[in-house]
Image: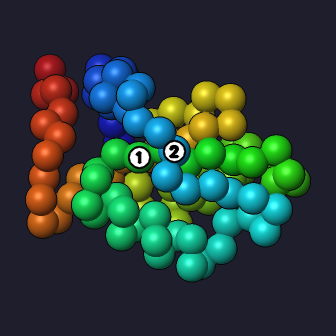
Amino acid sequence: MLTGKQKRFLRSEAHHLTPIFQVGKGGVNDHMLKQISEALEVRELLKVSILTNNEDDKNDVANKLAKGTKSELVQLIGLTVVLYKPSKENKKIVLPTKG
């Protein structure tokens, strides 16, 4: 679980990122979750955009993405989801301590 301080830090890190995945009409599926998990292993922090033709609630989509990829939901702003998962192989992001 991330602290408020850590989420603020990750939001600032994600600010300049562009979404690399899109959730469309088909919703969240296993293939998409596998791809996002692989991208999180490489990048640790990424954005996913929810297209307007998606009929699911954006909060449900964000939670499905986080749960399905075993990552932390950093932010849901508009139709953009920010996810974070520490990499096992190549850690790049150093979170502020919980102090």
Per the image, the residue denoted by label 1 is 46
Q: Position of residue 61 (x, y in %)?
A: 68, 53
Distance from label 2 to label 1 (Cα)? 7 Å
Which quadrant holds residue 65? bottom right
Residue displayed at 29% across by 24% down:
9
SS of the residue under disc 2: loop
Depicted 91 relative to depicted 14: above or below: below
SS of the residue under disc 1: strand
Q: Is residue 73 visible?
A: no
Task: Characterize the local packing of mark 2: few (<14), some (14-19) or many (20 or more) Cα atoms within 10 angstroms.
Answer: some
Depicted 17 relative to depicted 38: above or below: above
Residue displayed at 75% across by 48% down:
51
Say which amino acid is labelled 1.
Answer: Leu
How many numbered discs? 2
Q: Is residue 14 visible?
A: yes
Residue displayed at 36% across by 70% down:
38
